[in-house]
């Protein structure tokens, strides 16, 4: 571990055990990282008093030359301040949200008689923003509803005219340029549009009904008819919206998933029993932060984009955070739990689709990602680019064989596959068979001066693994490769000498690669064993037929493919291959020995 500079030691000694925000600076005074802590002294000191698995964290620590802190009253205030500082200073080691360019927003311009449209490169100084929308289709439907309800101007420059344009004649614009609508009335429509976008659709309908009644009472039936059409348009849109449960109102739901590089925070806003907004954040985990930290980073990002969060917030797991004015719920059953499951599924499917897109563009990237995942899971020193896997196969001790398959860069290298007929073992002894095969394989590689694999996988539990390991110890190569075993029953992964299996997420790509390797060797070994038994069976039947030698056996097998079909053949069919006399002898023999 690197020695901590003296000036930093002094700072660490004086840090308080209170909530706050800390900033790390480099030698040029540039902010490297901004973080929050429930207890500043404990959190900041942890960077310097333990060895970190992450190379990013180790690199950060080597660059720190100064530390500054700000004490606040609660962890929630620390989170708010941290979020503000990250946005202001954009430190290189903080998380990176990668969706701003991917999804559109609904913009309402900050100008007299505002315009409403979608935008992918929003300018917060010139427009009010709502979104982003992960479903472009849903956003366009919402904009279509708004345009059908309210004829808004769509020209980029508002120029006073004496006569309205064609858009007014088509009832697609209210012609503010000609004074056909007052700014007060236009802004009232914009206020309703804002409420519709925010999900306050029932409130807008109630407001429109009041206006319709007021116009009808004043005998202004044309205006009342226009509002009636607006109510019908909005009502139809609400009916077609994604309704989850009418009893669930005004809550924000956050789902979560993660892989080796990123976290995925999904967001659902529920208003009046319907999902009015859905989005997913893709967060680059630069500093190997915890799931709780990454989740709250996503929540804070949505808070900033939406202006505020609903009072009720549903989370996927327990959190120590206690946000002011909000109720945190982690449901275990019921309708709220179903919503949480939906949010979690959205995050998971987004992660899978992202990987599929990456893999289509760059297949090698996937291979390297999977191998790096396996390297990390098994705590290997080198990337397992060359993997070999072994499996034994026998039938009650008869015809014992073994198979070896080879994967290079995560893909089968079939030219390297090998079969082994067991030579030194009598009877059904899988341990001794595995010990023999491993010794033969790597003794030969050493003799031929060929490269050894990075990882050797044994299809079997601790007994087979230990037997195989004895061979590589005898060859003196135990430090040049890693060996693991896959227990057949639970598919647990064992290392030599470990009492408990290595934990690997059953859904992870690393686990799937090991299963693929194991399944491949199993299939390869079983196929060879069946073929060997079949040939032995054929040989044992035909060897005892008088007058049938090796040449005729080959002709018969070439013609009929199997003993079964030879037995089913007529004398005439057999005679075409071996002649009439031998055909009669063969036919009689096979019938008598069925």
Image (spheres, grey):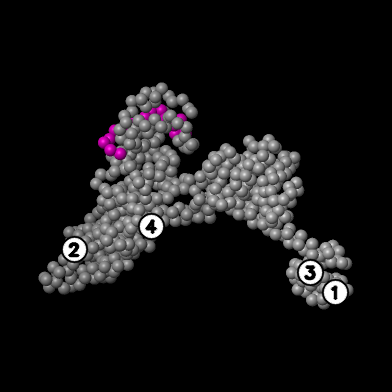
Tag 4 residue: 342
- Residue 594 pos. (x, y %): 76, 70
- 36 to the left or right of 176: right
Tag 3 residue: 593
Q: Are marks 1 and 4 in contact (CB under 8 Å)?
A: no
Residue occupying the far left of the picture:
218
**What range is drawn magenta here?**
58-75
Tag 2 residue: 207
CA distance for labels 2 and 3: 95 Å
CA distance for labels 1 and 3: 14 Å
**Res 269 quadrant in image:** bottom left
As displayed, is residue 548 above or below residue 87?
Answer: below
- Residue 454 pos. (x, y %): 62, 42
Nearest to the eye among marks 1 and 3: give it: 3
Tag 1 residue: 584
**Mark 3, secondary structure of its residue:** loop
- Residue 538 visible from this viewpoint: yes
Residue 60 colored in magenta in the image: yes
Q: Are marks 4 and 2 in contact (CB under 8 Å)?
A: no
């Amino acid at each position: 571990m690197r020695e901590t500079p003296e000036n930093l030691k002094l700072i660490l000694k004086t840090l308080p055990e209170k909530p706050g925000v800390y900033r790390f600076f480099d030698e040029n005074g540039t902010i490297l990282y901004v973080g929050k802590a429930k207890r500043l002294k404990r959190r900041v000191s942890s960077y310097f008093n333990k060895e970190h698995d992450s190379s990013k964290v180790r690199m950060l620590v080597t660059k720190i030359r100064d530390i500054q802190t700000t004490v606040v009253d609660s962890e929630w205030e620390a989170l708010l301040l941290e979020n503000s500082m990250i946005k202001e200073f954009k430190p290189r080691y903080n998380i990176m949200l990668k969706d701003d360019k991917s999804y559109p927003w609904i913009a309402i311009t900050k100008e007299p008689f505002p315009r409403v449209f979608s935008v992918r490169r929003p300018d917060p100084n010139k427009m009010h923003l709502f979104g982003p929308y992960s479903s472009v289709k849903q956003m366009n439907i919402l904009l279509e509803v708004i345009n059908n309800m309210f004829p808004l101007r769509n020209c980029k420059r508002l120029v006073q005219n004496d006569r309205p344009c064609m858009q007014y004649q088509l009832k697609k614009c209210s012609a503010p340029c000609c004074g056909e609508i007052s700014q007060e009335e236009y802004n009232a429509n914009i206020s309703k549009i804002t409420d519709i976008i925010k999900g306050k659709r029932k409130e807008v309908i109630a407001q429109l009904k009041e206006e319709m009644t007021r116009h009808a009472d004043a005998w202004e039936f044309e205006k009342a008819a226009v509002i009636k059409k607006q109510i019908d348009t909005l009502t139809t849109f609400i009916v077609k919206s994604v309704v989850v449960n009418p009893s669930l109102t005004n809550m924000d739901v956050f789902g979560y998933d993660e892989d080796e590089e990123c976290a995925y925070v999904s967001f659902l806003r529920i208003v009046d029993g319907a999902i009015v907004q859905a989005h997913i954040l893709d967060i680059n985990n630069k500093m190997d932060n915890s799931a709780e930290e990454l989740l709250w980073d996503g929540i804070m990002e949505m808070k900033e984009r939406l202006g505020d969060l609903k009072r009720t917030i549903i989370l996927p797991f327990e959190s120590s955070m206690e946000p002011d004015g909000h109720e945190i719920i982690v449901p275990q059953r019921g309708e709220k739990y179903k919503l949480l499951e939906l949010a979690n599924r959205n995050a998971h499917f987004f992660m899978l689709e992202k990987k599929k897109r990456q893999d289509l563009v760059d297949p090698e990237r996937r291979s390297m990602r999977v191998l790096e995942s396996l390297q990390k899971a098994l705590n290997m020193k080198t990337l397992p680019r060359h993997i070999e896997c072994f499996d034994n196969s026998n039938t009650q001790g008869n015809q014992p064989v073994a198979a070896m398959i080879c994967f290079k860069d995560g893909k089968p290298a079939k030219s390297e596959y090998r079969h082994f007929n067991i030579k030194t073992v009598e009877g059904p002894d899988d341990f001794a068979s595995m010990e023999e095969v491993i010794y033969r394989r790597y003794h030969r590689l050493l003799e031929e001066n060929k490269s050894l694999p990075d990882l050797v996988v044994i299809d079997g539990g601790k007994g087979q693994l230990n037997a195989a390991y004895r061979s590589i110890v005898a060859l003196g190569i135990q430090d040049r490769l890693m060996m693991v075993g896959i227990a057949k029953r639970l598919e647990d992964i064992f290392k030599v000498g470990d009492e408990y299996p290595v934990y690997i997420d059953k859904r992870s790509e690393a686990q799937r690669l090991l299963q693929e390797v194991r399944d491949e060797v199993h299939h390869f070994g079983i196929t060879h064993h069946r073929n060997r038994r079949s040939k032995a069976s054929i040989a044992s039947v035909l060897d005892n037929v008088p007058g049938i030698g090796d040449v005729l056996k080959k002709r018969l097998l070439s013609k009929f493919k199997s003993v079964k079909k030879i037995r089913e053949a007529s004398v005439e069919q057999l005679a075409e291959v071996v002649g009439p006399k031998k055909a009669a002898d063969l036919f009689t023999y096979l019938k008598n020995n069925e």
